[in-house]
Amino acid sequence: MANSVNTGSAPNADEQLLSLSTAGARQLTTTTKTQPQMQGISPRWLLRMLPWVQVSGGTYRVNRRLSYTVGDDRLNFSNIGAKVEIIPQELLKLPLLRGLDSEALTLDALARQFVQREFKTGDLIVEAGKPAEHVFLLAHGKANKLGTGKYGDPIILEVLGDGDHFGDQAVVESNDVWPFTVKALTPCTVMLLPQQAFETLIRQSPALNAHVEVYKRRLKMPQDKMGQAAIELAAGHKGEPELPGTFVDYELRPREYELSVAQTILNVHTRVADIYNDPMNQTQEQLRLTIEALRERQEYELINNREFGFLHNADLKQRLHPRSGPPTPDDLDELLSRRRKSRFFLAHPRTIAAFGQECNRRGIYPTPVEVNGSRFMAWRGVPLLPCDKIPITPERTTSIIVMRTGEGDQGVIGLHNAGVPDEVQPSLSVRRMDISEKAITSYLVSVYFSAAVLVPDALGVLENIELGR
């Protein structure tokens, strides 16, 4: 009779076992187990690459030279169906009106003077050499600002998108003409303010009239190429000419960054902490995963927070649009040309894949570079680091961020306060709270952080990138 072979399946009633089954053996063994696993933990390259500066007082002030070029921002609009409406307070984002003592009646009256116009793809919104008699607000769509090259060929000066504007400087000057052409790349909805209507409001509002006069004087003040108050110098002279006197003027109201906080309360039952603590410390494992979640939220806030997040705090002149839709080598070249010593790009993994597809389409193979022991795709030697905190909209558009970092290079820096009480990681504390009547121990877990852009050209963003084309 042949010997029976144990296949590991449950034995029949009349089959006799010759050895201990695995099911029985497991009762006398301890399984080999992992630590608790968690989806959503990313490499968090932004937190690794940012240089962190100690902020002991809770506030970091960025002092800069005085700039006569008043800062501006993109405008937001509301709509009822196809009718676009201007939010009056949004007009204060225009360089011409920035700093105006907001008179509700003046802003409301000004907003009502704008006229809505629709342009088709390929239409000229303005044409070089024609009279500049309107302020233009681009409510929706994309357009090219075109100039003329040295030999008469057309060149793209800038790509305009939702919320961009132009003509606010020309409208305060008489007999001015457009120095560029703006051509619609897509159907565009534009809001126009006629110069005549603006001049009528100036005559009716003394406050607006005084503000415009100050703006005109600023336009005539000497500036350097960055729009800062010029430092008068003399060079190449001979003999004993009278040298210019000068001083370096500073901003009177420099920006201050206060440390933000991300917090949560971790609850652990004392019975679990006391009894079920072998071979792994339950409290430590709960804290480890909670800290991971807080660090993920910290990186999300650095990207998306409206007060200090990079997507919302990039200077308008450092926000670019792609020339066609998907991210191309041309677009990344344009980003790099706006700053020196670019340290790294930051993009969603799907955006990096889209850029790789564009390179493949052109027969370009970017040389990878090594960062902290890992290899990444790079462009012009600048690595493209993945960050899944950069949002992708339902319309499948996203952004690429590039930055120069460090205080010594006047770049982007992270802010924290290392040394807080009950600290377990730099600027992250775990503070034990009371035990409740239900025998639950609570721990307050906090992380303090922020970020600062020391000069505007340290941070650049390529916006409205289209994926899936």
Image (cartoon, rainbow, N blue to C red):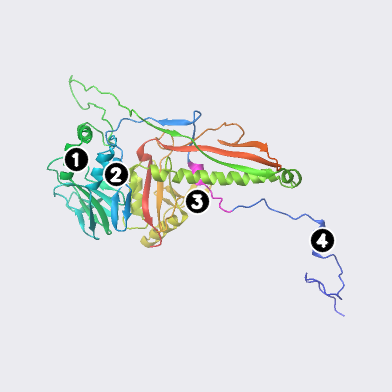
Residue type pointed to by label 2? Pro
Towards the viewer: 25 or 150: 25
Residue at the location (40% across, 62% down)? 468
Residue type pointed to by label 4? Ala
Q: Assess whether mark 2 and mark 4 are in contact (beta carbons under 8 angstroms).
A: no
Left or right of 333? Residue 20 is right
Check disc 1 and report the residue beneath it: 201
Residue 177 at x, y = what percent? 14, 46
How many angstroms separate mark 1 from mark 2 (CA)?
14 Å
Which label belongs to residue 375? 3
Residue type pointed to by label 1? Leu
Residue 289 at x, y = what percent? 61, 47
Which label belongs to residue 88? 2
User: Where's the C terminus, which quadrant?
Assistant: bottom left
Residue type pointed to by label 3? Arg
Instruction: Look at the image and give the residue range highlighted in magenta.
Output: 39-49
User: Toward which corner of the image does residue 196 lie, by quadrant?
Assistant: top left
**Mark with earlier residue (3, 2):** 2
Is 48 one of the magenta-colored residues? yes
**Mark with earlier residue (4, 1):** 4
Check disc 4 and report the residue beneath it: 25
How many angstroms separate mark 3 from mark 2 (CA)?
49 Å
